Amino acid sequence: MHMKKIFVSVGVVALGATAAQFASAADDNSKVWSVSVSLRGFYDDNFVTSSSGAEQDSFGVSVSPSLVLKIPLDQTTWSFRYTYGATWYEERSNLDSSNNAWDQSHELEGLFSHNFSERNSIQISDSFVVAQEPALLDSTGAVTVPFRTEGNNLRNHAQITFNGGLTKTLSYVLGYQNTYYDYENNGTGNDLADSTTPSLSGLLDRVEQEALANLRWRSAPKTVLLLGYNYRQVDYTSDEAVANVGLFPINSFVYADDRNNRSHIIYGGVDQNFNRQMSAQVRAGAQYVDYYNQNNSDTTPWVNANFLYQFRKESTLQLGASYMLSQTDIISPDPTSGSVTVDSRAFVLYGTLRHRFMRSLPNLTGNLHVQWQNSEFNGGTADGKSDSYFDAGVNLTYRINNHFSTEAGYNFSTLSSDVSGRDYDRNRVYIGVIASY
């Protein structure tokens, strides 16, 4: 990994959904600290996410210890969580002895929140991940790479948000977020070779920055209307050639930072609390994006909405949708027009359900997640083509006592693409035990 690039990002604070998810998880336990470890046996029918005819299946074992710390003070809360994952694949252990049969992942999340007064507060969070699975690498939005990626791939997402009150009905939100990606798969340093088979590092190593300013008006006791502006900038950090749009024998290389862009997003929205159990947030507007290194620009819709319903004390339903620009591993150079694929328009629908069977089986908890994403590519020979990605999983956990539980689950993911060679199906089933204290 490029250590100098890591240090550029690790010290920067920023913004995203991960902090809210972590805060909710931390609230589930009133203790200052807790530890847990899960042990699973599984079967994966396509652990390399290969296209039809090239699948590799494997039995395996995974172990994942986790530590959570939470320090609540009068006006301040500190939270921290670390999760380590180690996964062993039987099939990989049967291959060449130089092939490592283990995958390892690291997840670190930290949250700091402070209330200066009744109207003014600040929240700072950071989520650092080293992983191979897309669900971990792209947990803050649309899935950039919808397939499993070998190597110690790094993603850091940080945010800072300040909430301020001007009057009893008028307030504002200021925020900044920074997301950093570093993929282990690097190029050769030869422009012609790299442009022919670009590496994931060349295609996806980047820093995404976004600043926001919202003006909020409480028009009714349970209704808040808002007007917002976001400034977003994407800077690719690799110096590799990722495409060649020249016609033989003349080379015309496209480099990673040729896909840099900056965006202006203007939107309106509403936050609605229907009652103590049900709420919704909707943001809708337009995004103007400038690909300044290619003298090109575009305007697209921009939408972000979610709905939350807590129908019992330990049972919640969350639904969401978004439409916005997303980066992509597709480059598809077009020598005729001299263009390449610069990004994609990602439409995402998702839902999560957590339910504790209080009356019939009070020790049984079920979790269901579903996500569908359609990404339409912009530019190059893939212009107008799309990926359709679907991921779903169900988990049942039975609590034996306060310290031990058993679980079983199933995950399914599939990718259907207009770009040849990307389609795949993947099924995973597992059973395990969880110890916690």
Image (cartoon, rainbow, N blue to C red):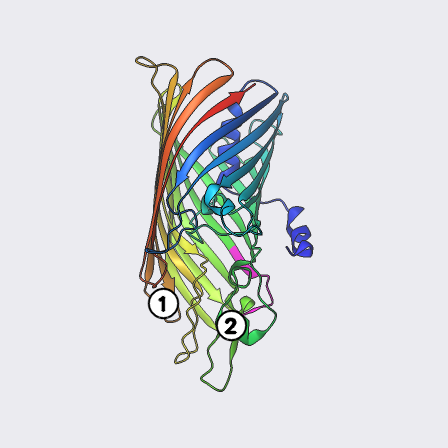
Secondary structure at numbered mark 1: loop
Residue of label 2: 195
Q: What SS does tag 2 mark?
A: helix
Tell me if residue 72 comes above or below residue 156 in the rendering.
Answer: above
Mainly helix, strand or loop, the magenta region? strand
Measured from the top left, where is residue 79 in percent x and y? 60, 29
Q: Amino acid at mark 2?
A: Ser
Residue at position x 39%, y 54% in the image = 50
Which of the pair 206/185 is nearer the observer?
185
The residue where tag 1 is placed is: 382
Q: Is residue 233 magenta?
A: yes
Q: Residues within 10 Å of mark 1 (few under 14, many from 20)?
A: some
> How many numbered callouts?
2
Question: Which stretch appears magenta?
Answer: 232-242
Mark identifier at residue 315: none
Q: Is residue 295 magenta?
A: no
Residue 287 location, quadrant = bottom left
Q: Nearer the viewer, residue 139 or 118?
A: 139
Q: Amino acid at mark 1?
A: Ala
